[in-house]
Image (cartoon, grey):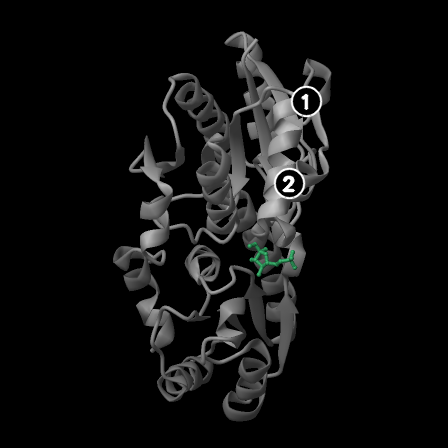
């Protein structure tokens, strides 16, 4: 019987479990033996590879995180560990892998393919939505809903106290989560690495609005601002308190954004990504590719393409937020 394995790598996200479930169910449907690689690249090296059963994936559709766990492994950069990983796969006659993760994980498997010919499909899965070539990554919609819920809650208390709040979102260098959340939550200020801004201009606007009756201010900032020469969360808090004169509190959302019950959108996307990935691997296509989702359509692109450019937020979205930075 033909065998395909699935693994999750790097930062986990909601939607991984639905993808794993769909993968296993669909493999059985296609008369293929599905395997689960536990603990990401670490488990691949250490040989934690187990044949999947229906029971392994029953009742996981609604759970965040990844049942087969994840890791960030530096050992995989070394040939001797990749060779060990290959030997582990050989024991089960596995030469095809579906990997959920980000571009770093795809690069790792691309090298693995070059070394040993293991074919793979990458499913973009990261809350950061920072993979070039796809409009959406798995997990983004759930993360946005978690941020939206938290921001709405913080707004309640900010308005009660006539305070400003600074909400910091994850995303590494990418401001997508902060940008979309700022728009969706009606923030007054949005600071992300991708948008030029001038605090003096924003400050003048806020002062006028406060003089005209604004009682509280919501400001969303991307975590990437710390390392990208723009204003960090603490600097924004200090500026709001000292220059604008409004009492301010900061909320760093942190890892709460990575968890939670996957949204319907993420469950559906997960199911489609997983099914198309299996079909691709069974079609006899050799090599490695990444499945992408653009304008409601799925396609496959090469790892080289995904790595050829840095992900850019669409201009239309940036335009929506431009009034929040001046
Ligand atoms: O890539 C996903 C992500 O959650 C980023 O947004 C964040 O910067 C990073 O992972 C956090 O990594 P860790 O969970 O290893 O602290």
As drawn, the label of residue 57 is 1
Viewer-side residue, 72 vs 87? 87
Seen at 48% across and 57% down, the residue is 177
Seen at 41% across and 50% down, the residue is 131
Could you say where residue 297 lies in the image, as x and y percent from the top left?
A: 31, 31
Q: Nearer the viewer, mark 1 or mark 2?
A: 2
Could you say where residue 121 lies in the image, as x and y percent from the top left?
A: 45, 32
Q: Rate crowding at label 2 as few (under 14), some (14 to 19) or many (20 or more) other CA atoms within 10 Å.
A: many
Of callouts 1 and 2, which one flags the residue occurring earlier in the amino acid sequence? 2
Could you say where residue 309 lies in the image, as x and y percent from the top left?
A: 32, 56
Could you say where residue 140 lies in the image, as x and y percent from the top left?
A: 50, 46
Using the numbered discs, state the Cα–Cα distance from disc 1 to disc 2 in whole angstroms. Answer: 17 Å
Seen at 37% across and 37% down, the residue is 292
Mark 2 close to ligand 1, CB under 8 Å: no
Circles 1 and 2 in contact, beta carbons < 8 Å: no
Q: Rate crowding at label 1 as few (under 14), some (14 to 19) or many (20 or more) other CA atoms within 10 Å.
A: some
Regarding mark 2 in the picture, which secondary structure is present there? helix
Viewer-side residue, 270 vs 131? 131
> Which image quarter: residue 43?
top right
As drawn, the label of residue 249 is none
| Above or below, comparing residue 58 to residue 72 in the picture | above
Circle 2 is placed at which residue position? Answer: 40
């Amino acid at each position: 019987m033909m065998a395909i394995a699935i693994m999750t790598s790097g930062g986990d996200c909601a939607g991984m479990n639905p993808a794993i479930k769909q993968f296993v169910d669909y493999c059985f449907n296609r008369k293929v033996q599905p395997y689960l690689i536990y603990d990401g690249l670490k488990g691949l090296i250490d040989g934690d590879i187990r044949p999947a059963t229906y029971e392994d994936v029953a009742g996981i559709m609604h759970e965040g995180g990844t049942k087969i766990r994840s890791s960030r492994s530096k050992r995989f950069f070394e040939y001797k560990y990749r060779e060990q990983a290959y030997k582990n796969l050989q024991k089960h006659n596995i030469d095809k892998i579906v990997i959920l993760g980000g571009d770093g994980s795809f690069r790792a498997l691309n090298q693995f393919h070059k070394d040993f010919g293991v074919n793979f499909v990458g499913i973009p899965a990261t809350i950061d939505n920072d993979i070039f070539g796809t409009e959406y990554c798995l997990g983004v919609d759930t993360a946005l809903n978690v941020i939206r819920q938290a921001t709405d809650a913080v707004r309640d208390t900010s308005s009660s106290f006539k305070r400003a709040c600074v909400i910091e979102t994850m995303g590494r260098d990418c401001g997508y989560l902060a940008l979309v959340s700022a728009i969706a939550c009606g923030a007054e200020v949005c600071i992300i690495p991708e948008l030029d801004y001038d605090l003096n201009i924003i400050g003048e606007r806020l002062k006028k609005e406060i003089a005209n009756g604004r009682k509280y201010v919501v400001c969303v900032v991307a975590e990437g601002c710390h390392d990208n020469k723009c204003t960090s969360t603490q600097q924004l808090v200090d500026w709001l308190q000292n220059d604008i004169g409004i009492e301010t509190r900061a909320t760093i959302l942190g890892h709460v954004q990575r968890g939670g019950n996957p949204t319907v959108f993420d469950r559906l996307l997960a199911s489609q990504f997983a099914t198309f990935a299996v079909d691709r691997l069974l079609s006899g296509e050799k090599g490695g590719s990444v499945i992408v989702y653009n304008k409601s359509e799925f396609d496959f692109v090469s790892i080289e393409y995904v790595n050829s450019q840095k992900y850019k937020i669409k201009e239309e979205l940036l335009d929506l937020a431009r009034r929040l930075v001046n």
